[in-house]
Image (cartoon, coloured by chain):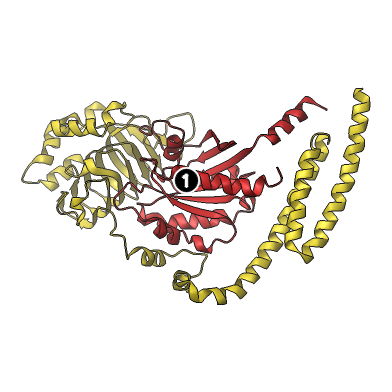
Amino acid sequence: MATAGSVANAAAAAKFWDYFQQQKETINALAALSKEDASQKIRELDSSLREAFIYLPPYDQKRLSKDLDELRGQHHQQRAASKQQGFKFKSAVVKPNNALTTMSSPVTSEQPSSVNGDAHMSPSSAGPSHKYTGISDSWIAADMLSSLDKVDSPGPTDCELRDITNSVVDLRPISHSLRALNCHRIQSSIVICGPFAGSMTVRDSNSCVFVLGTRQFRLENSQGVDAYLHCTSHPIIEKSTGIRFAPYPMELRTPRIEQEFYTTQLSLQPNSFDRVDDFNWLKRQASPNWSIQQPTTLPSADVWSLLDDTSKPREKLVQALLPAK
Amino acid sequence: MGLLSIIRKLREKEKEMRILVLGLDNAGKTTIMKRMNGESIDTVSPTLGFNITTLDFDGYKLNFWDVGGQRTIRPYWRNYFEQTDGIIWVVDSADRERMSDCALELSSLLKEDRLAGASLLVLANKQDIAGALSESEIQSAMQLNQHVTHHWAIKACSAVTGENLLEGLQWLVQDIAAHIYMFA
């Protein structure tokens, strides 16, 4: 019976092979006349091929699937080419009643330019809730009142720091409402933040200190950064070197911060500050790009207390806390 | 008839869809997947590699491939393109600075031959944040109106609150079903 079955299969397979070749020619001929009919035929051929899988030998299955893929690819290219031509004719008609498209049409469609994007965004959106950019040699203490007109919105907010040099930024007063903190181009500066249930991203920064509690910590393209974290997931680094990790300092865990750790539920999860993933180091051996700070190199309580010193001793703090170059 | 071919036939009968979840890092891809799967989102680490999630939805079996979006591993996205029925493109609506980056990645993705025919769902995530861009702002930032090669839809959503995730998925599954299982 097995022999009879395999003979029948072989006959069916040969028959299907002929049918497939014949359909292929039809489709190629059709492609020049009607794209729709051709794609319909391709779909039909696809489903009959799938049905035939049950008796086709493996070689035929592979070969015919590949043929069909090629056929589909050719057809798709032709279609795309003809569509582009058709689009040109149509666009002249469509343009007037589509104001948005007309506005953006001077810019080539290939490269979404940021200028163009901003133009679209500016009318209705005010930007991040808290934003500090282009700051140097200063001591910034964030507070809810100074941050735009978002005071009345008790909901979650985000914060952006950009181009900050030689400064101290204290975000503790606003941190509990944050869902995102994005830092870009921070140089020789210290950023202090309480716990928040969201994500932190640092890009293109060097010789900085970040103190915060967060769900996610990402560091990209940075050098010489010290991070003091309570992080409920694996912190990651990418294209970065000389990065040191340490736990959120006990000295800064005042009753208020402790309360925020509780309300943001960060304290319910273990601190994974030391389980760092380096995206540029997939070997089993330890990555040379980051390390855990030894207890002996951690800043003393005196240094942390400078943060709450009313005289705001910026230079003293920067000198004591920043990683040596 | 071999056992293997019977099994294969049965699998064909089972309505499976393969959905690729992509987007820049920190967009919330994994968080969205965890939320849809009813898991905790408190300890989601940035994805190094990929996660597979399978959901039964509307009589279909959905296989989600959630691939990490960090810059270093974006070149590996193409390893996952084969046989994709649908793409979910996740956007961090609060990340204005990288909006043009995001649009660029999306447009190069859509030029990919192997993704031709896949339906595209854009999720404008993180709507829970006060400063997030709206659905229409994301739509124009991603220049979706100029993408004529794929069926697409956009939904403003939040992985934290779960808002609109189901609606988006519903559209995607129906759109895929309409062109894949038309002969079934």
Query: Chain A appears in which tint?
Result: yellow
The residue that appears at 51% across and 41% down in the rendered structure is B67
Question: Position of B119 compared to A222: left or right?
Answer: right
Determine which quarter of the picture holds residue A177: top left
Question: Position of B42 compared to A83: left or right?
Answer: left
**Element type where label 1 sits in the image:** helix
Q: Position of residue B41 (x, y in %)?
A: 38, 34
Q: Position of residue A73 (x, y in %)?
A: 71, 54
Instruction: Name the residue that disc number 1 marks.
Output: B167
Instruction: Find the residue positioned furthest to the top.
Output: A1
Chain of the residue under the numbered disc 1 shown in the image: B
Judging depth in this view, the residue of A145 and A211 nearest the camera is A145
Instruction: Find the residue positioned furthest to the left.
Output: A311
Type of amino acid at the residue the image marks with label 1: Glu
**On screen, B135 above or below A81?**
above
- The image quadrant where one finds the N terminus of chain B is top right
Question: Position of A3 compared to B92: left or right?
Answer: right
Determine which quarter of the picture holds residue A268: top left
Query: Chain B appears in which tint?
Result: red
The residue that appears at 43% across and 60% down in the rendered structure is B141
Judging depth in this view, the residue of A280 and B94 nearest the camera is B94
Q: Position of residue A20 (x, y in %)?
A: 84, 48
